[in-house]
Structure formats: structure tokens, C-alpha cells
């Protein structure tokens, strides 16, 4: 599947649903005299290297030939100011309650007009790396932010004639993606900037925000929405396939940044088998076939775990919001591990992962919801499709430095459905999609707690060992107290005690939090994200069983 870039003149009419006021405002800006199109990564590199504020390190970029870069290309560093994460509060989704398309079209018209005297660069990429799902995206940025355009062309796959899979894919009835960004924009009514998403018309305006992640996630938001409308499940998670001696096992792990999603996806297997990695952040699942397609070739990775001695530094192409210092040879190198600020980031090439693939034809065998819920042991199995979808819709976790939020809310437990804060359609549609995946594709569901349990931290080794036991068939599950269709994997030091009233109350509180979220969804935004009634009913049943069990202990 591929998107539409060119229209016949008879299709360019008011009645064509692919056009909207906002889309016309944004796309038109791309054709102005102040916009120069960048067609090659070598040109993008040269512009980024010469840009004000760019630091050209003395670190060589690996695989320059395969990346279509100059052979002497170096890792480039750029740094933002106070804001070094995504600003969720800035997002406005056209179609949601209170978001007036007429108002935001006018706002964008004025922003484009004010920017007319500035030099802009534009580029285009492919989002979706297999002919089963692929669309084209266009981005324009002011010249002073050419390093972000360079990172964008690296993060996604720059559009050129070599992508035969795109040329050969069947067109879908949707337009290309168009994104206008002006980080210098200011408006008294929007001190935190604004991100306007018109997902039905595949366009976005990003105003007053410098952080590269805004460009990446706006693109993925539009691509996921397009996939959702065309028979795919939108996935903010990691996907890998274990290749064992007698079988394969395809695993999907869903979690927010900082939850362990990338660690799980990119970890090497401890058994004798091999592994294929699809991606650690963004992919789609075909509802018809159960197959999966990666949306990006590169990785937008945190650098907090990569000191200069790490072999992962070798695969970095650009870095953002990190420090630079001189080593013993007087060479400019990176200062990582979030010493400068939280959420230091890098664009790492696909070569960071051996055996990288862009498409997996086999269905998903196991799906893991990654939580940071201290009422759950490290690994819980869910045997009911509806209950599995409910726990995905009420995924409980904690925010990280990847987001621009108040520090006093950073460690609070929050509900983020399906670990995807970038959804721009009703929540019940994702609920039905995942429930169908568990039912029709017979995908197994597990909950992973990567935080702490009963006051003890759950280590990455414990998490990875638990997953490998499932894959090699050695996992032996025990009943999760009185809760039917739920069981857990016993791990030393992390055993739930169902005779402990304090623990039972903690579990009750967490389930009540989920119930409150489901009930709130019935009211907020006139029920825009209302879930099917069975979600509330099943949670009430779990609470009733747990309360009855607790009362029986007192009898």
C-alpha cells in the first residue's frame, strides 16, 4: 500500500475528502519560493554540518556507503534549550471535542505567512518498509534547523528511486503526509507551542517546538492513523522473532519510553537460537494476515546507557541534547548518560541491530504489555481475549524524561492505553483490534512489570529470563490468587502473598484505578474514548472476586 502524491485535475475538487483547509494550508507552503527541496543525504549532511550550533565531533559514522553519506562523515551533535522532551499538552487533534478546525486553519495560515521571509528546506521519506504498508511523508523546516531535517531523513527512509517496494505497492485512497514545522514561532496564547494534527487528511503543523521527537511522533501519528483506517493495528512497541532449532516465536512488547521496551526488543537471546529484530518503537500488524511491518529503519534511542566505551556509540549518526568534551587525543567526543540533561538522544542506524528485518510474515505468538505497576509480579499471563485487551487499554506505567512534564508528576502511576499516547481515533477501536488479535490469531498475552514489586526492584535480567522461559516452553505458571484467567510466573523474591491483606489492598487499589479510568472515559469528551461495556463489567468481576477472597480471610 502506498499513498497518493499526484492528483488528476478532475480529482482536485471540494468534494474530494482527501483535501481539507488545513491540508491545503500546509501543503501549499511547500511550493513557496523560500523552500528548497533536499533530495540527497549528502546534501542534508552538508547543510546540517554547516548549521549554527552544530558540533562536528571527531567520531566517524559507520557504514557511510550503505547510508548514502560522505565517506568522511562524522557524528553531528545539536542541543536544544530548556525543553528536551515531547510536550504532550501542545497536541491538538482535529476531530476531537473542542478542537476547532476553522480556528487552527487560521492559526496555521498566519504561521505560514509570518515564515515567508525565512529560508526553509524540505525533504521526503518513506514510512513503512514493506509493500504491504508504506506511505510517503514530506517535511519542511527553517534553514537554521537543517540538522533536524538531516536526522529526519536518517530516522525514516529517504525517498528515492531505489525503493522498488514503494513503487510496486498498491495505492490506497489516502494522500501523502505533509508536515510544516517552525520552531521559532511564538504566540501569547500558546506559550508551550502547538502541534495541530489533521489525521484524516494526513497533515500536521508543529509550531514553537524544537525537540526532534515532535517531528518523529507527528509523522508516526499520521502513519498509524492511516494504517488503522486500512486494516492494520497501530503499534507503539517493539517486535522481534526468535529463531529456535525447531520453531520460531514472534514477540511484541508495548511500553512507553523508559519502560524497558527497547531493552527487551534489542536484547540478544541467551539460548542457542538466533533472532530477527523488526523495530523497538513503531510497527503495524495486518489484521488479515497477522504479519508485521516496521515503519522506520533507524532508532531514536536514549543515550543514558551508552558511555563512550559502549559499542553502541559506533552506530550513532546524530546526537541531540548530549554533551561534548575532549578526550586524551584532543578529539571531540560525546558526554552521554544524561549528564548534561535528561533524555539525551541519538539517531542510530539500522546496523546497530544484527539480523534486522523490515517485515515478518508469521503471526504474533506473544504480546507483552509492559507496566510499572507495583501490585503485579514480574510476569502475569492473561488467558481471556477481552481481559487481555482491557489490561492493554488500562496499561499502567510511569512517565519518563522523554516527555516535557512537571517534575512533581514524573513518578506518578498513570494509565496510557496500549502505551500509545499518539492515538487520534476513539480508544474502543484499538480495544477491538487487539481483542480480535487475541481471538483470531490466538496470540498469547502477558503483563510485564519492569518497575518494582513488594519493595524490590525487578531487574532487566529477571525480565529477560522470564521471557526466555516462555519462548523455550519451560515457564510454569501458578494461579494468581482468586482471579480466574490470570496466572503468574514464580520468581524468587517476587512471590505475591495472597494471605497478606496489605498486598490484597494494593492489588484492589490498582484495579480500582483501572476501573475509574474506564468509567471516566464514558464521560470525558462526550464519551469519545468510551470502551465497550464488557470492559467495565470484567473489571468489576475481578474486584468482586478479590473483595470476597479478602473478606473470607477475616472470617
Image: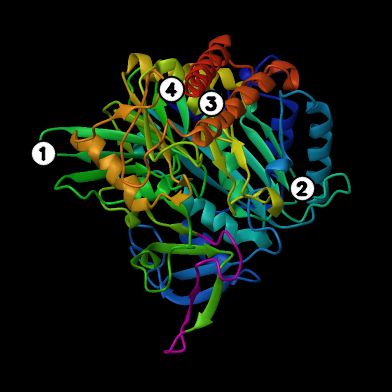
539 left or right of 434 in image: right
Is residue 426 something that shows in the picture? yes
In contact (CB < 8 Å): disc 3 and disc 1: no
Where residue 420 appears, as percent x and y from the top left, is 54, 35
Which numbered disc, 4 or 1, marks the residue closer to the eye? 4
Q: Residue at x 45, y 16 (%)?
A: 386
According to the picture, the residue beneath numbered tag 4 turns out to be: 388
Q: CA distance from mark 2 to mark 4?
A: 37 Å
According to the picture, the residue beneath numbered tag 3 turns out to be: 393
Mark positioned earlier in the residue sequence (2 or 4) = 2
Judging depth in this view, the residue of 357 and 140 nearest the camera is 357
Quadrant including the N terminus: top left
Q: CA distance from mark 2 to mark 3?
A: 29 Å
The furthest residue to the left = 246
Q: Secondary structure at mark 4?
A: helix
| 355 vs 283: above or below | below
Amino acid at each position: 500500500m502506498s499513498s497518493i502524491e499526484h492528483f488528476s485535475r478532475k480529482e482536485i475538487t471540494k468534494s474530494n475528502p482527501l483535501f481539507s483547509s488545513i491540508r491545503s494550508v500546509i501543503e501549499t507552503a511547500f511550493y513557496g519560493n523560500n523552500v528548497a527541496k533536499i533530495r540527497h543525504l549528502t546534501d542534508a549532511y552538508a547543510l546540517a554540518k554547516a548549521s549554527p550550533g552544530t558540533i562536528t565531533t571527531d567520531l566517524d559514522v559507520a557504514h557511510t556507503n550503505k547510508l548514502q553519506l560522505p565517506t568522511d562523515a562524522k557524528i553531528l551533535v545539536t542541543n536544544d534549550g530548556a525543553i528536551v522532551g515531547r510536550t504532550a499538552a501542545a497536541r491538538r487533534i482535529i476531530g476531537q471535542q473542542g478542537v476547532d478546525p476553522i480556528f487552527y486553519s487560521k492559526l496555521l495560515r498566519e504561521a505560514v505567512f509570518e515564515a515567508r521571509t525565512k529560508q526553509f528546506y524540505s525533504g521526503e521519506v518513506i514510512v513503512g518498509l514493506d509493500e504491504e504498508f508504506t506511505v510517503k511523508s514530506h517535511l519542511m523546516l527553517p534553514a537554521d534547523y537543517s540538522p533536524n531535517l538531516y536526522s529526519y531523513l536518517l530516522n525514516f527512509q529517504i525517498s528515492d528511486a531505489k525503493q522498488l517496494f514503494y513503487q510496486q505497492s498498491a495505492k490506497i485512497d489516502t494522500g501523502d503526509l505533509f508536515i510544516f514545522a517552525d520552531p521559532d514561532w511564538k504566540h501569547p496564547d500558546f506559550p508551550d507551542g502547538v502541534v495541530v494534527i489533521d489525521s484524516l487528511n494526513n497533515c500536521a503543523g508543529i509550531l514553537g517546538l524544537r525537540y526532534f521527537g515532535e517531528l518523529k511522533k507527528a509523522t508516526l501519528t499520521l502513519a498509524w492513523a492511516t494504517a488503522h483506517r486500512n486494516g492494520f493495528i497501530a503499534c507503539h512497541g517493539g517486535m522481534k522473532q526468535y529463531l529456535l532449532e525447531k520453531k520460531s516465536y514472534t514477540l511484541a512488547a508495548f511500553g512507553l519510553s523508559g519502560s524497558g521496551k527497547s531493552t527487551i526488543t534489542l536484547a540478544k537471546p541467551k539460548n542457542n537460537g538466533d533472532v530477527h529484530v523488526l523495530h523497538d518503537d513503531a510497527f503495524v500488524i495486518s489484521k488479515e494476515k497477522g504479519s508485521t511491518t516496521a515503519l522506520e529503519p533507524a532508532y531514536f534511542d536514549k543515550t543514558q546507557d551508552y558511555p563512550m566505551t559502549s559499542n553502541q556509540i559506533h552506530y550513532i549518526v546524530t546526537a541531540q541534547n548530549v554533551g561534548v568534551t575532549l578526550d586524551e587525543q584532543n578529539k571531540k567526543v560525546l558526554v552521554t548518560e544524561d549528564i548534561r540533561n535528561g533524555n539525551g538522544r541519538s539517531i542510530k542506524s539500522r546496523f546497530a541491530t544484527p539480523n534486522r528485518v523490515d517485515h515478518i510474515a508469521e503471526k504474533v505468538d506473544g504480546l507483552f504489555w509492559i507496566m510499572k505497576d507495583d501490585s503485579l509480579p514480574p510476569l502475569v499471563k492473561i488467558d481471556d481475549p477481552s481481559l487481555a485487551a482491557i489490561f492493554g487499554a488500562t496499561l499502567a506505567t510511569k512517565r519518563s524524561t522523554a516527555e516535557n512534564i512537571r517534575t512533581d508528576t514524573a513518578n506518578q502511576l498513570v494509565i496510557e492505553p496500549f502505551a500509545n499516547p499518539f492515538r487520534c481515533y476513539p480508544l474502543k477501536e484499538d480495544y477491538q483490534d487487539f481483542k480480535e488479535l487475541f481471538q483470531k490469531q490466538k496470540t498469547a498475552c502477558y503483563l510485564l512489570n519492569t518497575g518494582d514489586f513488594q519493595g524490590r526492584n525487578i531487574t532487566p535480567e529477571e525480565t529477560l529470563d522470564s521471557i526466555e522461559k516462555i519462548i523455550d516452553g519451560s515457564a510454569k505458571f501458578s494461579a494468581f490468587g482468586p482471579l480466574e484467567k490470570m496466572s503468574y510466573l514464580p520468581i524468587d523474591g517476587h512471590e505475591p502473598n495472597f494471605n497478606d491483606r496489605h498486598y490484597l489492598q494494593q492489588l484492589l487499589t490498582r484495579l480500582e484505578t483501572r476501573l475509574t479510568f474506564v468509567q471516566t472515559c464514558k464521560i470525558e469528551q462526550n464519551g469519545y474514548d468510551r470502551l465497550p461495556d464488557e470492559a467495565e463489567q470484567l473489571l468489576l468481576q475481578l474486584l468482586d472476586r478479590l473483595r470476597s477472597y479478602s473478606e473470607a480471610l477475616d472470617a
